[in-house]
Amino acid sequence: MEKILVVDDEARIRDIIRQYVEFEGFEFLEAEDGLAAYQLVKEHPVDLILLDVMMPNWDGITTLRKIREFSDVPVILLTAKGEEYDKVFGFDLGADDYVVKPFSPKELMSRVKAILKRVHREKPVEEEAYTFRSLSVNPKSYEVRIDGEQVNMTPKEFELLVYFIHNKNAVITRDTLLNNIWGYDFYGDSRTVDTHIKMLRGNLGEYRDLIKTIWGVGYKYEEY
């Protein structure tokens, strides 16, 4: 049985999520602050974490940073409206998704199931390294290098880049990216894609223009 850890300082929110987590057949674990969550994950590995951003002791961002030192467990951030900085910073630390409070528990569980499905999905057969000028991408080692220097990317940024490379010259909609990279469509937020594309372009530096915006449609990876 897959274990879902809910980290939130409000007992009422934890109790609401508990009902839906257990109804879906998952094991429910809870923590009321980031420090307690960190200690729990260190001792008892979990399959996914629902992590509130605003908490006493360690906030969600600090907790995510600490957990990422030893685990790549999927994390969905629970944020308040207007916390755009926290969302971007959370993605940069390796968060998989975010949900804005107040949220629909059904939507939240749809995202949980989609991420777990993606995690269990087999990796694509195509694992050949890719090179364009001084840019190299190695799917086997999850490495990106520019001029021989390794580029640090979050797992989602790397998956996006590899997906673009595999679909070179094709126009890809945001919904397609949500479905193939995040594993959901109806509940997906296109801003999630746009935020990750912005981060990916920033890390690509001189090669940022490989990813072109097709206004009103999506994106296209095109060598120049």
Image (spheres, rainbow, N blue to C red):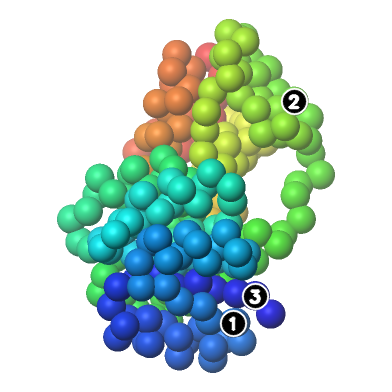
Q: Earlier in the sequence, mark 1 or mark 3?
A: 3
Which label number is shown at residue 2?
A: 3
Q: Is residue 100 visible?
A: yes
The residue that label 1 is drawn on is 27
| Mark in the foreground, 2 or 1 | 1
Q: Is residue 132 above or below residue 123?
A: above
- State the CA–CA distance, disc 2 to disc 1: 39 Å
Where residue 48 sits: x, y (%)?
Answer: 55, 66
Callout 1 crowding tier (Cα within 10 Å): few <14, some 14–19, many ≥20: some
Would residue 125 be found to the left or right of residue 135 on screen?
A: right
* Residue at x 43%, y 52% (from the top left corner): 64
Name the residue nearer the viewer: 73 or 119. Answer: 73
Q: Secondary structure at mark 2?
A: loop
Q: Secondary structure at mark 3?
A: loop
The three-letter code of the residue at mark 2 reads: Ala
Of all residues, the one furthest to the right in this rendering is 125
The residue that label 2 is drawn on is 129
Where residue 94 sits: x, y (%)?
Answer: 48, 46
* Residue at x 37%, y 35% (from the top left corner): 198
